[in-house]
């Protein structure tokens, strides 16, 4: 009697996320602004533009994460991941106030600012994912993107101190994202594990979403420098 072929071992959640980070990582030269900031060559005005754009991005992303958490209400590990992200956006907005103050932005300037389309492509696509995409796949996509985002923020935070003389309060936003919440990785792995176990997470599909998120992330930075 012929033996049945052995089933391929299931990938672990950590392996799926590690592969997503590695596979979706952008090219080193794709971001045109961060290297200029790192070298102290970007004009100081880019930080004001960044702060103005981020006010729009944070407001949108917080709503997207809240909606994803509600959609995953029957899947606690996934809902917990997006609840944490939504809370993090609230904290990020508080940190952004220090940068806005250092750039001498007024409340009126922030309210009346007309955002750049290229900077708002990312939150617009994240909202699209929140409306109609399987939340488990979004966990994989955004986790891969956060790896790049955190690296950019760490570089900018250092350059703001070394080349631009910004005070600590102004660097707080970037420092906040340079070191994500201690339990974010654990919650991401738990969410993906649940998604794999229940058949909700499809890495190949999630990578397609992640590819676009990374492209829109780069568009954000490059639109500021343009």
Image (spheres, rainbow, N blue to C red):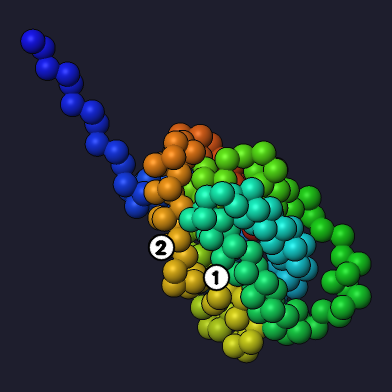
- Closer-to-camera residue (107/156): 107
Q: Return the x and y of residue 54 as percentages of the image width and height.
A: 72, 65
- Locate the N terminus by quadrant: top left
- Closer-to-camera residue (18/81): 81
Q: Is residue 177 visible?
A: yes
- Closer-to-camera residue (215/31): 215
The residue tagged with tag 1: helix, strand or loop? helix
Q: Return the x and y of residue 42 as percentages of the image width and height.
A: 64, 69
Residue 207 as seen in the image, left or right of residue 99: left
Gap between marks 2 and 1, in whole Å? 17 Å
User: Is disc 2 surrounded by few (<14), some (14 to 19) or many (20+) residues within 10 Å?
Assistant: few
Residue beneath disc 1: 177
Residue at 62 percent across and 39 percent down: it is: 133
Residue at 75 percent across and 63 percent down: it is: 59
Q: Return the x and y of residue 184 as percentages of the image width and height.
A: 47, 65
Residue 209 as seen in the image, left or right of residue 118: left
Query: Which residue appears farthest toward the bottom when viewing the image?
Result: 167
Query: Which residue appears farthest toward the front when viewing the image?
Result: 74
The residue tagged with tag 2: helix, strand or loop? helix
Question: Quadrant location of residue 196?
Answer: top left
Residue 66 as seen in the image, left or right of residue 114: left
Question: Quadrant location of residue 3?
Answer: top left
Q: Is residue 40 above or below residue 197?
A: below
Q: Is residue 85 above or below residue 67?
A: below
Residue beneath disc 2: 186
- Locate the C terminus by quadrant: bottom right
Residue at 44 percent across and 36 percent down: it is: 199
Q: Nearer the viewer, mark 2 or mark 1?
A: 2
């Amino acid at each position: 009697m012929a033996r049945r072929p052995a089933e391929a071992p299931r990938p672990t959640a950590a392996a799926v996320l590690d592969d997503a980070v590695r596979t979706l990582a952008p090219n080193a030269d794709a971001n045109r602004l961060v290297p200029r900031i790192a070298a102290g060559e970007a004009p100081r005005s880019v930080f004001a533009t960044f702060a103005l754009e981020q006010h729009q991005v944070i407001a949108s992303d917080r709503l997207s994460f809240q909606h994803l958490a509600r959609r995953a209400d029957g899947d606690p590990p996934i809902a917990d991941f997006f609840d944490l992200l939504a809370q993090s956006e609230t904290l990020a907005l508080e940190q952004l106030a220090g940068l806005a103050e250092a750039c001498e932005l007024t409340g009126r300037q922030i309210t009346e600012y007309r955002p750049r389309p290229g900077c708002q492509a990312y939150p617009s696509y994240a909202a699209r994912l929140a409306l109609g995409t399987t939340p488990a796949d979004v966990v994989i996509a955004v986790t891969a993107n956060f790896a790049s985002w955190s690296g950019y923020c760490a570089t900018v935070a250092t350059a703001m101190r070394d080349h631009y003389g910004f005070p600590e309060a102004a660097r707080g936003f970037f420092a906040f994202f340079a070191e994500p919440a201690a339990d974010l990785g654990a919650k991401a792995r738990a969410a993906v594990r649940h998604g794999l176990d229940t058949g909700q997470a499809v890495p190949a599909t999630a990578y397609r979403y992640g590819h676009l998120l990374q492209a829109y992330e780069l568009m954000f930075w490059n639109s500021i420098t343009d």
